Image (spheres, rainbow, N blue to C red):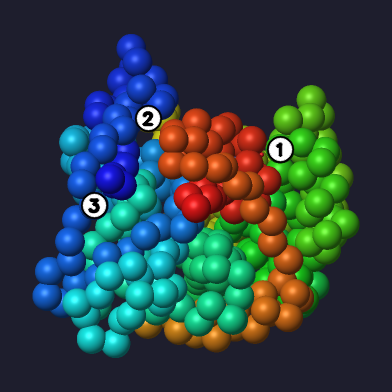
């Protein structure tokens, strides 16, 4: 008999026991039956995203913490295997928030039917999904690059950064990426078409950053926080715009994303704005309308790191937070 497998959040990270795979517990249960108005989805892909680390903490944030003992949340692409919902049939491909498990029940409000011919199915969790829309929203509503301006994108080769940098290039900006390692930086310049990329692991990162931004910095798509943000503030031009998308390096383990030169915000009259991609859902169709054709035509490049099997999810998740991923981190479930 086939069973459903689910990762639950078992415990919260603490100062004594930092976050790790021990915080999750794998359980097996019977595969549920759909009730009237529901579908049963067999997940094919699970998305691993940095926001999940924040949900593990019991801390004030833009969303409620994940409940202990509840299935880990997560975006999924899957196939309908049983349906009691009009308009959905076995074989349909759907996008949802099925979580870290093999099967989930869904209703009309919680899934979106996908066109399997439009894009590779896992792209709906990456450049054509939440990360891609995040890049689009931060750039179009906050950074708003103008031709010739310099825009810095941190975590430049990750799921969000890849799209943010390429969109900024298409708007005519000079794009400077910040990424971990020479291989990622080479990918940013040679494949993604960024004008420069600085390795934040290099001993002379600060000098390299200055050399890569000879005309200062007009826009920042910030995914990391800490030192890269501090360097952008130090190089900021008057009336620069800084979109605070994520603080993966410094904020997620409970340490503040400190910068020592916040005074630059006043001196350079900067706009610094945090945003969450779900703040304005009316923007999503516009983002999809721009992104999907660019991905389908291959004009917008993207990469993926793929773990195999649900059991691999915890390790892949923490590896991503250490920068071991190359592009969108996914788990292939079938
Ligand atoms: N505001 C929103 O609505 C929203 C939505 C989605 C994502 N986000 C945020 O966007 C950011 C990127 O997310 P993503 O899904 O695209 O993840 P990602 O960039 O694919 O993966 C995380 C990357 O963060 C970088 N990183 C990790 N630790 C670091 C450190 N100590 N110093 C510098 N860089 C470090 C690593 O890249 P390197 O190897 O290059 O260092 C790693 O590959 C995250 O902060 C995430 O929380 C925000």
Q: Is residue 168 above or below residue 333?
A: below
Q: As rendered, which of 10 and 150 lies closer to the eye? A: 10
Give the number of the mark in front: 1 or 3: 3
3D distance between C-alphas at marks 1 and 2: 22 Å
In this rendering, does residue 42 appear at all?
yes
3D distance between C-alphas at marks 1 and 3: 41 Å
Characterize the local packing of mark 3: few (<14), some (14-19) or many (20 or more) Cα atoms within 10 angstroms: some
Q: Disc 1 marks which residue?
A: 180
Residue 160's image quarter? bottom right
| Position in image of residue 79 (x %, y %) | 41, 67
Q: As rendered, which of 194 and 94 lies closer to the eye? A: 94
Asked if disc 1 and disc 2 are in contact, CB closer than 8 Å, the reply is no
Ranked by sequence position, the earlier of labels 3 and 2 is: 3
Residue 83's image quarter? bottom left
Q: Is mark 1 within 8 Å of ligand 1?
A: yes
Q: Disc 2 marks which residue?
A: 254
Name the residue located 41 percent from the left edge and 47 percent from the top edge: 51
Q: Is mark 3 within 8 Å of ligand 1?
A: no
Give the number of the mark in front: 1 or 2: 1
| Position in image of residue 19 (x %, y %) | 39, 25
Q: Is mark 2 within 8 Å of ligand 1?
A: no
Characterize the local packing of mark 2: few (<14), some (14-19) or many (20 or more) Cα atoms within 10 angstroms: few
């Amino acid at each position: 008999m086939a069973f459903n497998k689910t990762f639950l959040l078992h415990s919260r990270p603490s100062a004594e026991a930092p976050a790790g795979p021990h915080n999750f517990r794998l359980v097996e249960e019977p595969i549920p039956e759909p009730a009237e108005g529901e579908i049963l989805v067999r997940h094919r892909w699970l998305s691993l995203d940095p926001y999940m680390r924040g949900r593990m903490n019991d801390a004030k944030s833009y969303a409620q913490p994940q409940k202990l003992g509840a299935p880990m949340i997560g975006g999924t692409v899957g196939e309908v295997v049983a349906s009691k919902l009009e308009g959905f049939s076995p074989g349909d491909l759907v996008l949802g928030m099925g979580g870290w498990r093999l099967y989930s029940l869904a209703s009309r409000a919680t899934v979106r039917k996908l066109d399997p011919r439009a894009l590779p199915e896992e792209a709906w969790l990456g450049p054509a999904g939440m990360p891609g829309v995040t890049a689009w929203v931060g750039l179009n509503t906050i950074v708003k690059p103008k031709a010739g301006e310099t825009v810095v994108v941190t975590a430049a080769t990750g799921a969000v950064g890849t799209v943010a940098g390429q969109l900024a290039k298409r708007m005519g900006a000079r794009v400077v990426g910040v990424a971990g390692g020479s291989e990622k930086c080479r990918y940013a310049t040679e494949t993604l078409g960024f004008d420069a990329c600085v390795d934040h692991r290099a001993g002379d990162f600060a000098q390299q950053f200055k050399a890569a931004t000879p005309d200062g910095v007009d826009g920042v798509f910030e995914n990391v926080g800490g030192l890269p943000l501090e360097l952008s503030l130090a190089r900021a031009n008057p009336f620069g715009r800084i979109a605070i998308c994520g603080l993966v390096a410094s904020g997620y383990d409970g340490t503040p994303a400190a910068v020592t030169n916040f005074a630059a915000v006043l001196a350079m009259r900067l706009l610094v704005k945090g945003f969450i991609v779900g703040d304005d859902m009316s923007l999503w169709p516009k983002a999809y309308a721009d992104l999907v054709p660019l991905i389908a035509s291959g004009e917008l490049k993207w990469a993926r790191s793929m773990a195999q099997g649900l059991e691999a999810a915890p390790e892949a998740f923490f590896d991503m937070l250490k920068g071991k991923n190359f592009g969108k981190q996914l788990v292939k479930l079938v």
